[in-house]
Amino acid sequence: METSSDGFSYVGPHLIRFEPPDIVFCRPIGRISAADVRGVLDFNATIAKQIGRGTFYLGDSSRITGYSIASSLQLFQSSPMEYLRGTAIFGANFHQRTQNSAVLRAIRLLGQPMSRLPIETFPDEASARAWIDELRRKG
């Protein structure tokens, strides 16, 4: 995994970095595949193990151009509650918000373990980070 000068590494074409004390910040670029989802989840799991507690995933969706169906299935097959404390997404367009809502609704209806994970979307990065700060304060 290469690391750029601004601290980002790459999962496929997507930028990702750890921001102490417990945030994994990701900027997906282009289309998201199942392998990309698995790589981002693995990155989160590795960081959580290194810091000894769960992480918060902060995702900038403004550069996403699409999702493979397999990327949604990868979420269904994963169990990120072991290493994630919450997920905040910002910058998503209407289509992305609609697709995210449909996937989350399906996860909840099917009773998938991931449905217990706090996941929210926000219009901007500042409000997403404020929500993470609030979750962190609540423990």
Image (cartoon, rainbow, N blue to C red):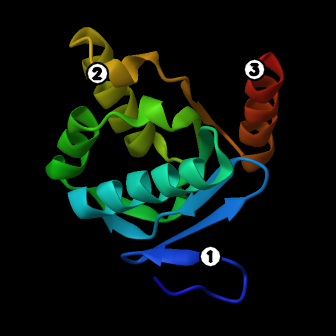
Whole-number angstrom distance, CA of label 1 to CA of label 3: 27 Å
Q: Position of residue 89 (x, y in %)?
A: 57, 42
Using the image as rendered, state which of residue 8 and residue 54 is in the foreground.
54
In this figure, which residue is indicated by the disc labeled 2? Answer: 107
Dot 3 amino acid type: Gly
Using the image as rendered, state which of residue 99 and residue 87 is in the foreground.
87
Examine the rendered structure and indicate whether residue 120 appears above or below residue 52: above
Mark 1 closeness class: few <14, some 14–19, many ≥20 residues within 10 Å: some
Dot 2 amino acid type: Ile
Q: Position of residue 105 (x, y in %)?
A: 32, 18
Q: Quadrant of the C terminus?
A: top right
Q: Quick check: can you spot residue 59?
A: no
Examine the rendered structure and indicate whether residue 38 appears above or below residue 63: above
Whole-number angstrom distance, CA of label 2 to CA of label 1: 30 Å
Using the image as rendered, state which of residue 126 and residue 36 is in the foreground.
36
Examine the rendered structure and indicate whether residue 77 appears above or below residue 71: above
Dot 1 amino acid type: Phe
In this figure, which residue is indicated by the disc labeled 1? Answer: 8
Question: In what element is the residue under mark 3?
Answer: loop
Question: In what element is the residue under mark 2?
Answer: helix
Looking at the image, which residue is at 78% across and 50% down?
A: 21
In this figure, which residue is indicated by the disc labeled 3? Answer: 139
Looking at the image, which residue is at 55% across and 49% down?
A: 49
Q: Quick check: can you spot residue 51?
A: yes
